[in-house]
Image (cartoon, grey):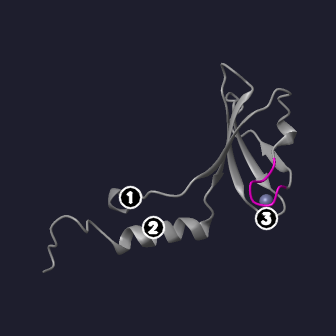
Amino acid sequence: MSDSSRKSVPVHLEFQSQVDSEHELSGFLCLRCESNLDINQPEAEVPERLLGVCGDCGSWYLIEIDPENESDIIVARIPDAQELRKAIESANAKPNSKSSKPNR
Ligand SMILES: [Zn+2]
């Protein structure tokens, strides 16, 4: 991919910060359907950064555990393909609406 295809858009991020005194990694629930998440650790050297996948609705989650305080956990739902495309579309629909309009 060339650099011109690389862009950034704001997306709506749904998350939950929880204090889990038991620190049970199997206890994370999907924010959408409340099913248990399957927890994966993509990087062996980074045990405080996990990926959660809901087997029911297919949502993905980024789970961040504070290494200084393991009961401080953030569970953020990663936008799905539909949400990503919607965010990109709405960003493209109003490009620099407040600045100059070169096509007029
Ligand atoms: Zn779910």
Near mark 2 (Cα within 10 A), the count class, few <14, some 14-19 or many ≥20, is some
Quadrant of the drawing holding the N terminus: bottom left
- Residue 87, position in %: x, y? 48, 66
Check whether the beta carbons of the residues at disc 2 and disc 1 lie within 8 A of each other.
yes
Residue 24 position in % (x across, y down): 86, 33
SS assignment at label 3: loop
Residue 46 visible in this rendered orientation of the protein: yes
CA–CA distance between discs 1 and 3? 28 Å
Mark seen at residue 57: 3
Compute the Cα span from label 3 to label 2. Answer: 23 Å
- Residue under label 2: 88
- Find residue 75 and report its horizontal and vertical position in percent: 69, 43
Start and end of the magenta stretch?
A: 29-34
Q: Earlier in the sequence, mark 2 or mark 1?
A: 1
- Please state which amino acid type lies under the numbered disc 2: Ile
Dominant secondary structure of the residues highlighted in magenta in the image: loop
Residue at 86 percent of width and 41 percent of height: 27
First reached walking from the N terminus: tag 3 or tag 2: 3
